[in-house]
Image: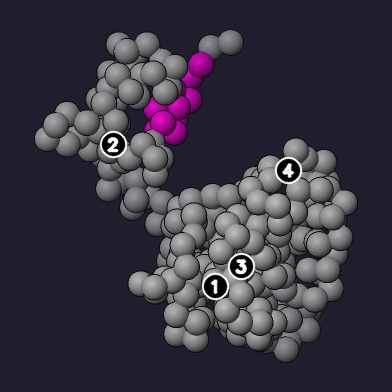
Amino acid sequence: MTVSVSSRLLTVLRTFSHRTPLQTLSEISRRSGLPLTTTHRLVNELLHGGALEREADGRYRIGLWLWEIAALAPRGLGLREVAMPFLEDVYEATRQHAQLAVLDGCDAVFVERISGRSAVHVVTRVGGRLPLHLTGVGQVLLAHADPELQEHVIAGPLRRYTRYTVADGEQLRRRLADIRRDGYVISSRAIEEISLSVAAPVYGADDRVVAAVSTVVPYGQQDPLTLVPLIKAAARGVSRVLGAPSATGLPKSDCRTSIVWQPS
């Protein structure tokens, strides 16, 4: 099977991550599985196109042009700008973490996070991703995803991070049903035993879930149920700006008269 040039270019770009933001040519070649001569040619093409930049020491990093392109993603910058005032409200109320995530495959991708200096440690970062079963936002997104995706994730394997991780398929199925019934989830100590998250769904103009918001706070310092109204109000606020009929009070047939979100 012939591998296209575009596929190889993407393979090179995928070697970069938050763990490998700077790489030498040899490291890119090794991680991509491409010959060094091929890697050299592809890297030069990406360099000249602005997708990569070269440091003074000869190592490469992702270029600013890719950030400009990524900002055009409708579930990225535009959604972030709509959600930011409500995330700020969550942060002001908790002085911990306020997060926004979207669905991508079997992962939750974090498109924004506001954190305080003394906030509890989290493993998430803007642009990072985590398996859907693992986080509050992921479980919210999965609960409202296509049934085929739900069954795929439930079938596993479900990686366990702590003894509190929902790593059993039937337990996860019940959790998803509870989320659809209650409109929120409390995910306690699933990734680290020092924290818990409270998350709720964000609806778009067609009343489908397009994102999830959450806060992450230290475990044991307050009753997480007291955070539920805050998170549900933030999610409802974002949904209202996006024109979700369920958040604006309009019937679904009147979607055409509701606010239409235009990505920036």
Question: At label 4, which amino acid type do we have?
Answer: Leu
Residue position marked by numbered label 4 in the rendering: 158
* Above or below: residue 217 compared with residue 254: above
Residue 33 in picture, x, y percent from top left: 44, 17
Question: Which residue lies at the image location 64% right of the left edge and 61% below the top edge?
Answer: 189
Labels 3 and 1 touching (C-beta < 8 A): yes
Q: Magenta-highlighted stretch: main secondary structure?
A: helix
Marked residue nearer the N-terminal end (4 or 2): 2
Labels 4 and 2 touching (C-beta < 8 A): no
Between the residue at mark 3 and the residue at mark 4, the CA separation in whole angstroms equals 19 Å
Between the residue at mark 4 and the residue at mark 1, the CA separation in whole angstroms equals 24 Å
Tell me, yes or no, if residue 236 can be seen here: no
Labels 3 and 4 touching (C-beta < 8 A): no
Horizontally, residue 31 falls left or right of residue 61, namely right
Labels 2 and 1 touching (C-beta < 8 A): no
Residue position marked by numbered label 1 in the rendering: 217
Dot 1 crowding, Cα within 10 Å, few <14, some 14–19, many 20+: many
* Above or below: residue 114 compared with residue 143: below
Residue in the foreground of this view, choosing between 143 and 168: 168
Between the residue at mark 4 and the residue at mark 2, the CA separation in whole angstroms equals 31 Å
Question: At label 1, which amino acid type do we have?
Answer: Val
Residue position marked by numbered label 3 in the rendering: 196
Q: Which dot, 3 or 4, sits closer to the camera? A: 3
Q: Secondary structure at mark 3?
A: strand
Residue position marked by numbered label 2 in the rendering: 22
**Exactly how many numbered labels are in the figure?**
4
Q: Quadrant of the N terminus?
A: top right
Q: Which dot, 4 or 1, sits closer to the camera? A: 1
Q: Which residues are magenta?
A: 3-15
Marked residue nearer the N-terminal end (2 or 3): 2
